[in-house]
Structure formats: C-alpha cells, structure tokens
Amino acid sequence: MPAYIADSSVFILGMPLPPPPQNRTVTTPDVLPELKDMQSKMRFEAAVDQGMQIEAPLPHLVSEVCDHARATGDIARLSETDIGLLAKTLEYDGILYTDDYAIQNVAESLGIKTEPIAQEQIRETFEWGMRCTGCGRRFESGDQTCPVCGSRLVGYRKNRKRL
C-alpha cells in the first residue's frame, strides 16, 4: 500500500484524499502556513481528523533532494516546503500529489511518482541554467547577478527530455 504525500495545493483545491486505513496520507508541517483561506485550513484539519500524518522530513533526504534540484537547476524555484515534501516522498517511496511543475521536474530526476491535482502532468523535463543578460555568459548556479559584469541573470533551458 503506497503512501500519499499531500502538497498544499491538495487542500487549496479541495482534492479528495484516499480514505484510511487502506491508504496512508502524509504531509509536512510547512504545508499549513501556506494555507491562507479558511476553506483550505478546514480541509487540512479534516484530513488530520481522518488520519493524515504530519511529519518533518529527514535531513539526509532533504540534502539528497537539494542535490538533485541543483543538478536540474530548479533549486531557486523550490521552497523549503517543496523540498521537504519531495524528501518525505522519498522516505516513503510514495506518490506525491502536486501541480507544481518544478516539483514534478525534480521528482522525475529522483524517480518519484507524482499525481497532478488540477493541472496536466508534465510531459517533459528540463535542466535549467543561468544566462547573463549583459555579457551572455552561462552559469550553473542560481545567483541573481553575473559575477563577471554584474548584470542580471535569467534562467534558460539547457536540456529538454520528453517523457
């Protein structure tokens, strides 16, 4: 029986979760602060009442997720919550419910299965880099300014892979 890991969009969009006890649903403590309206907070509390577990991600898995996010170039696009959810999904070898394309991109590189909520699932993955708007040099890091000329860096797709 797989574990289902719930992103904040599950509660914001009101996705029905698989019923316990046949299915285990887990989220991280960082999801709750992302819920701004009363309805999504009530959905969250209802899920807790029905057995959803709230667990912090394991630090060594957070590091692994960060390494993969750096490799794909998505590290600047992911919040701490996103990274924690990916780490929790790795821990349980579960299925992550999310509509976030950056999360899905990193999940694909980690071999994590994702299920979309309202959006379509990604059809291709990207590896991102940074390009200077001034001198045109390309960089791996997620810095905001060029270390050579001081101009702004913008993201570009280095590689693309169809799924």
Image (tube, helix red, strand yellow):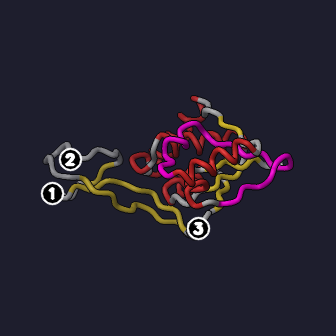
Residue drawn at (45%, 47%), measured in percent from left and top?
A: 78
Mark 2 lies on residue: 146
Mark with earlier residue (3, 2): 3
Expressed as whole percent of the image width and height from the top left, the position of residue 38 reads 53, 51
Which is more toward the observer, 102 or 43? 43
Residue stretch rendered in magenta on the structure: 15-37
The label nearer to you, 3 versus 2, is 3
Q: Tell me the kind of residue under disc 3.
A: Ala
Expressed as whole percent of the image width and height from the top left, the position of residue 124 reads 54, 67
Within the magenta stretch, is there residue 121? Answer: no
Mark with earlier residue (2, 1): 1
Contact (Cβ within 8 Å) of mark 2 with mark 1: yes
Residue drawn at (53%, 34%), measured in percent from left and top?
A: 63
Evaluate whether residue 138 shows in this view. Answer: yes
Contact (Cβ within 8 Å) of mark 3 with mark 1: no
Which is more toward the observer, 144 or 95? 95
Residue drawn at (65%, 60%), measured in percent from left and top?
A: 15
Expressed as whole percent of the image width and height from the top left, the position of residue 70 reads 45, 44
Residue drawn at (28%, 57%), measured in percent from left and top?
A: 154
Q: Is residue 143 left or right of residue 56?
A: left
Q: Which mark is residue 118?
A: 3
Q: Which mark is residue 134?
A: 1
Q: Residue extending furthest top?
A: 59
Q: Tell me the kind of residue under disc 1.
A: Gly
Q: Is residue 131 left or right of residue 71?
A: left
